[in-house]
Amino acid sequence: MTTATAEQALRKHPFVQTFGEPQIAKLAALAREVAFERDQVIFREGDDCSEFYLIVSGLVALEIAAPGHTFRIQTLRGGDEFGWSAMLMGRGKHFQARALERVHALAFQGADLIKACQEDAAFGYAFMHRLLEVVSERLQATRLQLLDMYSPVAKRAGA
């Protein structure tokens, strides 16, 4: 994938809606195109996966694997992102990510993103502000799943 192609894909992606042209160009220079096949585990909870992904097309399940069962926390699609913990370098993934169908995405090395954020304060602010929104969305999705599973209303309904 060329930088120009990556820029075109990024301009369509909601993650960069508030980014200026120089910030999109900087991010495009760090992009690498990747694809995952249906049912492919992209990373497991606890893995030291160092990549952040912007989904171009396809579906990805974010899951928590428990003994004998896997709980789906959220289903992501084109226009979503995952792997934000790559920015924490060496801390391990908080969820398992699995392709539900063929997925095309842009991948970014966490170390490269951190370096770009350190070298360019405007880029770093825009990126980290947007990333904080993603983390907040994941926290809310997890909260809603827990409420759904453990709510007294759900128990009365036989769930």
Image: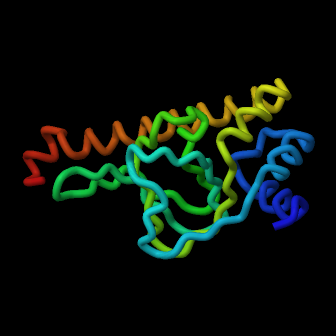
Left or right: residue 5 versus residue 63 is right
25 or 11, nearer to the observer:
25
In this picture the colour scheme is rainbow
Q: What residue do we see at 78% from left, 61% from top? A: 9
- In the rendered picture of this protein, how many numbered marks are placed on residues? 0
Residue 116 pos. (x, y %): 79, 35
Residue 157 pos. (x, y %): 10, 52
Residue 124 pos. (x, y %): 76, 29
Q: Is residue 126 above or below residue 41?
A: above
Left or right: residue 49 versus residue 109 is left
Q: What residue do we see at 28% from left, 52% from top? A: 65
Q: Quadrant of the N terminus?
A: bottom right
Left or right: residue 59 versus residue 14 is left
Q: What residue do we see at 68% from left, 30% from top? A: 128
Residue 153 pos. (x, y %): 15, 42
- Using the rendered view, name the quadrant where residue 19 is placed: top right
Q: What residue do we see at 81% from left, 32% from top? A: 123
151 or 33, nearer to the observer:
33
